[in-house]
Structures are given as C-alpha cells and as structure tokens.
Image (cartoon, helix red, strand yellow):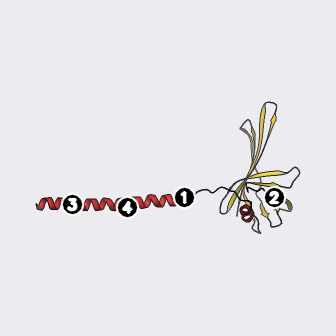
Amino acid sequence: MIKKHKQFVLYICTYWKAMNRIKFVLLGLVSAGIIGYACKKEPIDSKLFVERYLIGTAKWPIQSYVRLTLKNNDTLVKDTAALDTVIFNSDFKFIKGTTAVGFTIDDTGKNITFNTQPDSTWQIAYLRTASFKLIHERKETVGSDVMTYKIEQVLKK
C-alpha cells in the first residue's frame, strides 16, 4: 500500500512539473503572437498620415540613392549619386539644396507627385519610424526591348 502511495505521489509531482512547463511554453507562444501582431506592417492608406509624417522642419538625409537601367529585366547600369538632405515643408515644397519644387500626395497616401516638367510621380514603398523609401519607375519600348528606368532613394531622419 505504501508503495502505491509513493507511486501516486510521484505521478502527481511529475504531472505538476509537466503542467508548469506547459504553462511556460504556452505563455511564450502567446507572447510571441502578441509581439508578431504588434510588429505587423501596416498599409499606408491615408493622405493625412503621410502629410503629418513627412511635412515639417525636419531634414531628411538621403541614406541611399540608386539609379538603375534595365533592358528586359537585365541590369545595364547601376549608378549611385552623391547624398544630400531634403526638406518637405508645410507649404508643400520639396527643398533639395537651393531648389524648391511643389509636391502633392494622392488621396491614398501611396504616391507623391512633384510639380516638375514633366510631372514626376514617386511611389512610397514603405514608411518606418525614422525612414521611408521612394521609388520612381518609367518604362518604354524600344523595338522589341523593354527599357526600365528606376530610381530608388531611402531617406532617414
């Protein structure tokens, strides 16, 4: 009888330890899920949000500027340019060096159009806490070849 009692106590202790491990594993999985949901990339869907994010007196240094020329999706030229600093001010002017150009943001907040000749529309690839990426792409057909001209720049506070 004592032997059965010891076995029962041992079984309860083993069961209790296993339950404690399961609690920690479950807590870890729930925590990972919450963190994953909190870090989820939110889509850009608001003109007002983009305006508030970009516009102000803050200077945006260009972290990288890459110009690509592609022929039928094969890279012909990959060029980088000198880095500069830009400002999007409250008068809806884009200031780079001594040049100021007007700009507008579309209703969805996904594109910026600069008032140049001809107009230049740039796609906002992403917005992060202290950086964002702009992409300008133009395609043209030359004979049977498709030429793609692409400029990507990452701006970081």
Instruction: Count every numbered label the image shows and give the total.
Output: 4
- Tell me the amino acid under the disc marked 2: Thr
* Residue 33 pos. (x, y %): 49, 58
Q: Upstream in the sequence, badge 2 or badge 4? A: 4
The amino acid pointed to by label 3 is Leu
Cα–Cα gap, marks 2 and 4: 53 Å
Secondary structure category for the residue under label 1: helix
Cα–Cα span, label 1 and label 2? 32 Å
Badge 3: how crowded within 10 Å, few (<14), some, or many (20+)? few
Q: If the image is split into quadrants, where does the N terminus sit?
A: bottom left
Horizontal and vertical percent for residue 32?
48, 58
Residue at x 78%, y 38% (from the top left corner) = 147
Q: Which mark is residue 10?
A: 3
Residue position for label 2: 104
- Identify the residue position indicated by label 4 in the image: 23
Closer to the chain start, of discs 1 and 4, is: 4
Q: Is residue 58 visible?
A: yes
Q: Position of residue 15 (x, y in %)?
A: 27, 59
Tell me if label 1 and label 4 are in contact, CB under 8 Å.
Answer: no
